[in-house]
Amino acid sequence: MTSPPDQPEPRKFHAWVSNPQPSSWTPLLCWIVPLALIELGIVPYMWQQQYGPQETTITVVFSALGAIFAQGALLTVGLVWGTQPFAQRLLVHWIVAINLYGCWNVGYWYVASQENGWSHDWREVASTVACTVPVMALAAQGPLWITRVWLGWRLLHVEMESTALLPPPELVAQAPNVRKLSVLDLMTATACVAVSLGVYRLVSESGIKNLSRADLLFDVITASTFAVGVSLLGILPIVCLFFSRASRILAFVLSIAYAILVCVIFIVIIGAISRVGVPTQIYRILIPQFLSFAIVFGIGLTCLREKGWRLVR
């Protein structure tokens, strides 16, 4: 009588922080290092090239901006769709964000210390960015929080050797139900919103040279609207592509094609609104920015997928 074959050990999901193995998240954190170098070098590059060919400078700068938006998208994905305690996710999110902001600030400070023409604008620009970024972050998180709270979307780690692109149904059934937020999570979220709005109010009341409160409010509203658009048109579709049944190469091709499609739509809209047609600089601004966002964001999502992370819906 033959013995029955050994049953494979059940495969279980593990949350990000509860998985003690650093190999599952180290590649993504390593990907932040070159992005920090981009933050550090973008303003010095603009300073060095201020008298050089503007076409090349515009292309490089807006490509860098696309990469910066992509790093914000990766931080947003980790904060909203992670499954560790919300306070821990929030802490990691803002530690990384503040360090990236510090890299950009150091680069700007270096330029301001080298040339007086930039020193007068340094504090004004740094204060405006510090005021705008927290509110932009809240705006970008809004659509993702809807998918998290009402639809149950979250990133979970599969602790197994598998090439499956989507987790099987039995593993989805084992995944923890994390739709509901605890009282502590709600209190932490409320405090986060209060601090973000408090930073805006502090900066607006302290006054910024050559920028009225109305202009600052307009800048914040414009930036927040832009952040919502990036979340709806950029983060959600590309995440769905990379965590679908598509292969890595196909996901990259589709995400780049999608970025080009959205870019073309924006150019057509600008051409329809403008009476003089589409300026040539618009092409140098939008195309590198959209492509850079899709590529950098896609690399970050690939790091997550290759280390066993799956989007559970």
Image (tube, helix red, strand yellow):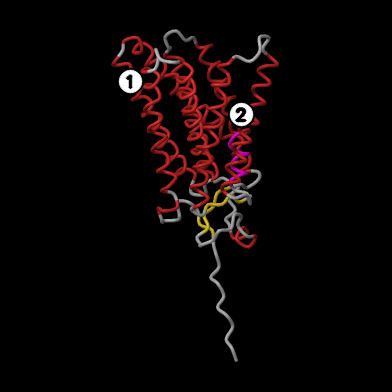
Q: Which residues are magenta?
A: 234-242
* Residue at the outermost right position: 272
* Magenta-colored stretch includes residue 236: yes
Give the answer, above or below, for where 16 lies relative to 216: below
| Residue 70 sits above or below residue 9 on the image | above
- Give the label on residue 229, or none: 2
Residue at far top of view: 210
Residue at 31% of width from left, 21% of height from top?
110
| Dominant secondary structure, magenta | helix
Query: Quadrant of the rendered structure where residue 93 is?
Result: top left
Please give the name of the residue rendered at 56% of the width and 52% of the height, measured from the top-left corner. 310
Answer few, some or many: residues within 10 Å of disc 2's Cα (few below 14, many 20 plus, some between 14 and 19).
Answer: some
Label 2 vs 1, first from the N-terminus: 1
Q: Nearer the viewer, residue 87 or 64?
A: 64
**x, y (%) of residue 287?**
57, 26
Residue position marked by numbered label 1 in the rendering: 109
- Outermost residue toward the bottom in this view: 1
Image spot of residue 136 (x, y percent): 52, 27
* Position of residue 167 measured from the top left corner of the image (x, y, whole percent): 60, 57
Badge 2 marks a residue whose secondary structure is: helix
- Residue kind at label 2, given as amino acid type: Gly
